[in-house]
């Protein structure tokens, strides 16, 4: 015996957003925990060590947070003026930071002690980075220069002064420690080689550069500024592509998901997540205010965004391991199938398993049409899943019992039905099947309108208003369609190629007319 | 005369298998089902056919199984009164007995409950001159005893016989009147009236009890009619009762009707009932096995379903489903070599005519079968009206429509099904609601050997035709395809009635009223429109020629067949014919046209038909040409490469075939679609004695450079650092070069093998050269060894 085929309610369902694996992945981040700081959040950096503490630079201090408890673990506040761009070394033990005092400071994270002080810049230092595998620090300053420092001797090794405006962005090549790039407010990205001691490459970004980033292969770097992210090839500064998904200045970029995803935060309050192979947006996160800085922990567990108004939004990935364990738990009594031996000699009469059926399906199966109608006329069904109501109404009409249902309508359901009519008549997908139903309803109740309560009569009047309105709109649309078709037809007619000789309209020239030869045969 | 006498009609399926109730053998191993003029025995457990009982040559009115001296025998009675008996296990005919009675109405064995009783009798009932005659045939002595009871009765009566052997009674029903008589007292006819017309009668084999079904869906049991007459009413059915069947003990009975629900009742307990709902189709016949273990349900979709007494499915015997009509015609599926046609409402069926086997059916609409509460309130189901399969058999397009009176409640779905090769079934890919505003008149796939870039055109009464195209909707997460509308066309606000693609799919012919238009499916561009100034009949069907006649388009209107030449844009010939429909073959240039009394086979190039059949014509509903699976010895004839199948109005599938033994075609290939006139004059295999010198090409240039380019084309950020890559790139190049050398050698060898005869000779010479060379080298080597020995 075949099972009862459930109604296909998807026919009238509005197509909802496509759920991709990325959406599911990033949806797991959950609601962010908000931590209030003083002043705009300048920079966020994650420690490469477990449990991935993160350093938040804002105002006159650098605070190290625990991502799980969201509490401050360490507070580095040995700044007289604003601190900028605190980053961890790849072992997580040291932290360097720039500051408005135009010095670069090096801290020991565990003891919070200041280890080194690099003096030499003449203006604010906004970004500082450790060089991979070398005892060096690179700093990017508002005095339009980039300096490389030796940590042990506290001396500067090289200075590149090639920008014409503030340098607010920088990155160190992860493969070649000699290579570094800087982005300035002059809209230029420069690449330097420490072996040459000067810039070897210049890329024109054409907007104040807010952040630069190397992809892990080291051959490609990204720069962001204005509303664009530009992708550059290190070989000859070839522009590989430009991504503009934000509508306000992009302030920060981060790699995530084992370098397979790129996150960009912008003043338009969104964080866009791109696939790094084709730079298509796979997901978008929205925050309450403009984003200045962004941090992602190594395993995507924590995403932190720093906002202009001093809020730090810490979103943590929700684990679903607990749920799995709960599912496995079952009492012995109900798990008898697995533990007891099945008898083999007896004839086993298997029970037919009924799948889970929707309420309206169960009623339809039993031919209880009035009850099926009542289940889908509940106001929450009409509001949340109008396509279900529509499908069941149409099925009742197909089964030729809608007439009877309408005849026996209670006032309560009549009001709901009219509300559904009023709402559905202006819907493109619903209007077509609704029209015969409204006809049917009016045929039955038109003559008895005076016996109905006032609110129902009011609804009927509202419905008639709605129908006139719809008619007017449709009339306007057909006028528009007609005029559009005229334009399209005209453009097609002009397209048709004509014989060029026809246009010339060749007439015999005077010379030709003179040389007239008559054949007399 | 062109008419071929050697072609005969062969039945390839169809015909009802559910006119008579199936019968179980006493051993419960087989169930016997009656076909048109044959009986078939099937295994109960597997549903596979076991034996065929032929030799009837007439319509069978009744059959049964009885046990005589330990061996099971099958006995059947034809309409002409011939009683035939077979051995059930061997299908060997034991005897036949002529009762010489025409117009037999009923045949039934009585007193079957007394096993071992030699007094087994068969009742035969026939009508002659307003009189109902009964004959009793003693199966052991073969004696036939007649008994005439005169009833004043019309032709449409129902009769049954029951009761134990010493008190046999007969029950006759006509309209709403029941007549009852016992054989012990044949003159005492008792008449009873009911409020509704009767539809079924069944007599209890033991007691004086009659069960009747009526049009209102009631089942009434009449008990002790001769005495007080007790009536019990069992009312669940809302539609007329079609069949009732008592269990062998007689305490329970089953009933069924158009609701497609089997009901089990306890006798005299009208409220104690069990249901088996949602059977595939209306119940036609019911039957119970000897010990009540199995119940056989014959449903109107030409199937017999065997269930156990606790309503579990045991097996299913499915024959070609006979719908009310075949609106979509027949389509040939190239993948399964099956004929595809409408099956049960909302389903398509794949039927293989070679082994007369139903392969599978596809539920297209996915809706429950709903019967109305009343006969008047019949619920019209949504049904498939058109369908087509593409040339590779990988896509099926179906059009479902529902016209329930007014224009607003018109429903239409266009669905595209893709064949999933791993799961071996069709899966729904795209479902389009309201592809057109009005009825769709034709749907065709563009002929294409490719899996991508497939197009499909629909024409509709809304005066548009639409082009649907397969598009790639894959993203970074996976591959997927879908169908979408890429263009629509119209012509002078006229209705397109038919559609045909040229053999290579480059052009589509669509007739609008009397004007034949051709379009480019790729760009939806009008190529030409053709209309004859005199013959202005509306064109109903069009078909392109095949092969060398691919420039000809055949257009069929109701009373004219004309052929247009697309190269000269003129009508080539025209013939006046009352055409019911035109059928083109897609592999051979032949076409067939069915008129009200004849069938013609012709080529578009000539108005002279190659074959005329006067037997078939008016009763053909739809037809199809299929590539011939068997090699026919009649070379050069139109039926050498393809066969024509058709369905008659009696719902039987026939094919025109030669009357000779057939052998399997070894090769079964299509003609290539790009078979141009030029390609026909060029040879398939070319040989040349000219030696071809291959220019010297450096190894590194040949293929490794391609791979290197491929590597360089990769986005650099997805690659490891260049320092790590360098060595492996270089090493692959070296390896490639070596491989290239080897490949060159093997290539030249294989090339020589494929060459013609002269080349083989050369090769043999070469081989000899090689041999001598080897010998020489061995000679060269030997002295060296000898020298080493010396040194």
Image (cartoon, coloured by chain):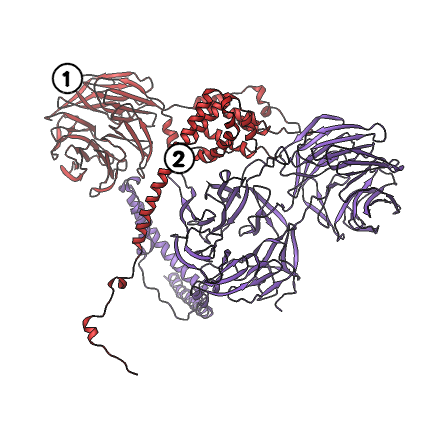
Q: CA distance from mark 2 to mark 1?
A: 71 Å
Chain identifier for the purple-coloured part of the image? B
| Residue behind mark 1 | A80
Marks 2 and 1 close (CB-CB < 8 Å): no
SS of the residue at dot 2?
helix
The label on residue A471 is 2
Which percent across, then down, holds residue B605? 50, 66
For residue A76, above or below residue A361: above
The residue lying at 66 percent from left, 50 percent from top is B650
Work out whether residue B320 can be spotted: yes
Q: Chain drawn red, letter?
A: A
Q: Position of residue B361 (x, y in %)?
A: 58, 43
Q: Earlier in the sequence, mark 2 or mark 1?
A: 1
Q: In screen coordinates, is A234 left or right of B705?
A: left
Q: Is residue B585 above or below residue A282?
A: below
| Chain of the residue under label 1 | A
Taking depth in this image into account, of B778 and A339 the one nearest to the observer is A339
Residue A300 image offset from top left, x and y in percent: 34, 27
Label 1 secondary element:
loop
Q: Nearer the viewer, residue B790 or A346?
A: A346
Return the x and y of residue B294 as percentages of the image width and height: 72, 35
Residue B271 found in image quarter: top right
**Nearer to us: label 2 or label 1:** 2
Q: Is residue A438 left or right of residue A31?
A: right
Of the 4 image quadrants, the one containing the C terminus of chain A is: bottom left
């Amino acid at each position: 015996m075949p099972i009862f085929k459930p109604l296909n309610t998807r026919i009238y369902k509005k197509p909802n957003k496509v759920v991709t694996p990325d959406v599911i992945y990033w949806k797991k981040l959950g609601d962010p925990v908000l931590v209030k700081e003083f002043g705009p959040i300048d920079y966020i950096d994650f420690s490469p060590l477990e449990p991935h503490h993160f350093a938040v630079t804002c105002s006159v201090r650098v605070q190290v947070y625990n991502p799980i408890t969201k509490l401050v673990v360490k507070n580095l506040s040995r700044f007289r003026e604003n601190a900028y761009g605190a980053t961890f070394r790849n072992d997580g033990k040291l932290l360097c930071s720039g500051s408005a005092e135009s010095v670069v400071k090096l801290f020991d994270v565990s003891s919070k002690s200041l280890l080194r002080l690099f003096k030499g810049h003449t203006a604010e230092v906004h970004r500082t980075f450790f060089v991979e595998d070398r005892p060096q620090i690179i700093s990017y300053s508002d005095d339009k220069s980039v300096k490389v420092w030796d940590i042990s001797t506290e001396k500067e090794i090289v200075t590149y002064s090639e920008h014409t405006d503030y340098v607010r962005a920088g990155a160190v090549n992860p493969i070649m420690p000699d290579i570094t790039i800087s982005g300035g407010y002059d809209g230029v990205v420069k690449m330097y080689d420490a072996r040459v001691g000067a810039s070897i490459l210049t890329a024109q970004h054409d907007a104040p550069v807010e952040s630069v980033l190397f992809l892990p292969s080291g051959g490609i770097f990204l720069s962001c500024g204005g509303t664009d992210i530009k992708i550059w090839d290190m070989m000859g500064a070839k522009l590989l592509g430009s991504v503009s998904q934000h509508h306000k200045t992009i302030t920060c970029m981060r790699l995530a998901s084992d370098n397979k995803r790129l996150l960009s935060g912008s003043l338009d309050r969104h964080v866009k997540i791109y696939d790094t192979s084709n730079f298509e947006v796979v997901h978008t996160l929205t925050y309450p205010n403009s984003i200045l800085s962004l941090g992602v922990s190594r395993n995507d567990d924590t995403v932190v965004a720093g906002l202009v108004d001093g809020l730090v939004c810490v979103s943590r990935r929700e684990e679903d391991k607990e749920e799995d364990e709960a599912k496995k738990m079952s009492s012995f009594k109900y798990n008898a199938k697995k533990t007891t031996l099945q008898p083999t000699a007896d004839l086993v009469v298997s029970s037919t398993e009924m799948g889970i059926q929707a309420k309206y399906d169960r009623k339809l199966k039993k031919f209880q049409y009035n009850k099926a109608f009542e289940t889908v006329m509940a106001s929450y069904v009409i509001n949340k899943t109008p396509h279900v109501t529509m499908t069941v109404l149409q099925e009742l009409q197909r089964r030729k019992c809608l007439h009877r249902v309408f005849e026996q309508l209670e006032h309560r359901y009549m009001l709901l039905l009219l509300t559904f009519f009023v709402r559905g008549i202006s819907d493109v997908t619903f209007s077509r099947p609704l029209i015969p139903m409204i006809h049917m309803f009016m045929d039955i109740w038109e003559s008895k309108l005076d016996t109905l309560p006032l609110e129902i009569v009011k609804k009927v009047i509202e419905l008639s208003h709605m129908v006139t309105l719809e008619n007017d709109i449709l009339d306007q649309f057909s006028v528009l369609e007609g005029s559009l078709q005229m334009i399209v037809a005209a453009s097609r007619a002009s397209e048709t190629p004509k014989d060029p000789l026809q246009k010339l309209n060749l007439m015999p020239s005077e010379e030709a007319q003179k040389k007239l030869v008559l054949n007399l045969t | 005369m062109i008419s071929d006498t050697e072609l005969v009609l062969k039945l390839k399926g169809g015909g009802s298998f559910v006119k008579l109730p199936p019968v179980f053998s006493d051993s419960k191993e087989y169930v016997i089902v009656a076909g048109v003029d044959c009986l078939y025995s099937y295994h109960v457990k597997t549903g596979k056919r076991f034996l065929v009982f032929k030799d009837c040559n007439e319509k069978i009115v009744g059959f049964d199984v009885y046990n005589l001296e330990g061996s099971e025998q099958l006995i059947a009675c034809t309409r002409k009164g011939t009683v035939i008996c077979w051995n059930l296990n061997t299908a060997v005919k034991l005897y036949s007995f002529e009762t010489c009675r025409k117009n037999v109405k009923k045949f039934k064995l009585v007193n079957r409950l007394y096993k071992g009783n030699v007094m087994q009798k068969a009742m035969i009932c026939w009508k002659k001159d307003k009189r109902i005659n009964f004959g009793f045939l003693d199966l052991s002595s073969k004696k036939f005893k007649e008994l005439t009871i005169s009833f004043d009765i019309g032709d449409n009566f129902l009769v049954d016989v029951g009761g134990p052997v010493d008190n046999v009674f007969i029950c006759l029903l006509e309209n709403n009147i029941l007549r009852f008589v016992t054989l012990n007292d044949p003159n005492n006819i008792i008449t009873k009236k009911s409020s509704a017309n009767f539809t079924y009668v069944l007599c209890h084999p033991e007691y004086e009890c009659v069960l009747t079904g009526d049009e209102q869906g009631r089942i009434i049991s009449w008990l002790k009619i001769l005495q007080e007459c007790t009536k019990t009413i069992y009312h669940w059915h809302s539609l007329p009762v079609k069949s009732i069947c008592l269990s062998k003990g007689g305490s329970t009975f089953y009933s069924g009707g158009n609701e497609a629900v089997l009901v089990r009742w306890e006798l005299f307990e009208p409220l104690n009932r069990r249901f088996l709902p949602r059977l595939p189709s209306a119940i036609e016949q019911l039957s119970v096995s000897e010990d009540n273990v199995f119940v056989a349900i014959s449903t109107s979709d030409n199937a017999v379903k065997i269930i156990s007494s606790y309503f579990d499915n045991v097996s299913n015997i499915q024959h070609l489903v006979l719908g009310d009509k075949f609106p979509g015609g027949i389509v040939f599926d190239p993948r399964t070599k099956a004929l595809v046609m409408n099956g049960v409402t909302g389903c398509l069926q794949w039927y293989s005519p070679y082994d007369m086997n139903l392969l599978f059916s596809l539920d297209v609409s996915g809706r429950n079968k709903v019967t109305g509460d009343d006969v008047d309130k019949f619920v019209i189901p949504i049904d498939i009206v058109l369908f087509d399969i593409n040339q590779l058999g990988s896509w099926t397009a179906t059009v479902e429509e529902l016209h329930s009176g007014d224009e607003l409640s018109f429903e239409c779905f266009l669905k595209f099904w893709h064949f999933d090769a791993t799961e071996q079934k069709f899966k729904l890919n795209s479902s389009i609601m309201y592809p057109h505003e009005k009825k769709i008149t034709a749907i065709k796939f563009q002929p294409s050997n490719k899996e991508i870039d497939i197009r499909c055109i629909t024409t509709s009464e809304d005066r548009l035709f639409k082009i649907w195209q397969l598009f790639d909707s894959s993203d970074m997460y996976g591959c997927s395809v879908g169908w979408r509308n890429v263009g629509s066309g119209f012509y002078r606000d006229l209705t397109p009635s038919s559609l045909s693609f040229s053999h290579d799919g480059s052009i589509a012919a669509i007739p609008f009223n009397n004007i034949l238009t051709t379009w480019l499916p790729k760009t939806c561009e009008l190529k030409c429109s053709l209309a004859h100034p005199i013959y202005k009949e509306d064109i109903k069907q069009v078909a392109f020629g095949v092969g060398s006649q691919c420039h000809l388009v055949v257009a069929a209107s109701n009373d004219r067949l004309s052929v247009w030449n697309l190269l000269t844009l003129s009508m080539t010939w025209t013939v006046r014919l009352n055409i019911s429909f035109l059928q083109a073959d897609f592999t051979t240039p032949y076409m067939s046209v069915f008129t009200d009394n004849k069938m013609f086979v012709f080529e578009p190039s000539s108005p002279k038909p190659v074959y005329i059949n006067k037997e078939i014509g008016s009763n053909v509903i739809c037809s199809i040409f299929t590539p011939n699976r068997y090699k026919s010895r009649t070379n050069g004839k139109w039926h050498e490469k393809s066969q024509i199948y058709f369905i008659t109005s009696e719902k039987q599938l026939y094919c025109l075939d030669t009357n000779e033994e057939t052998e399997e075609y070894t090769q079964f290939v299509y003609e290539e679609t790009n078979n141009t006139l030029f390609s026909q004059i060029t040879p398939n295999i070319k040989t040349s004695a000219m030696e071809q010198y291959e220019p010297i090409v450096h190894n590194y240039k040949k293929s490794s450079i391609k791979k290197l380019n491929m590597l360089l084309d990769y986005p650099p950020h997805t690659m490891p650092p260049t320092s790590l890559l360098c060595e492996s790139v270089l090493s692959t190049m070296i390896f490639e070069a070596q491989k290239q050398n080897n490949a060159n050698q093997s290539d030249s060898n294989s090339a020589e093998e494929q060459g013609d005869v002269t080349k083989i000779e050369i090769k043999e010479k070469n081989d000899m050269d090689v041999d001598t060379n080897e010998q020489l080298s061995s000679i060269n080597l030997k002295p060296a060894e000898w020298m080493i020995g010396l040194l």
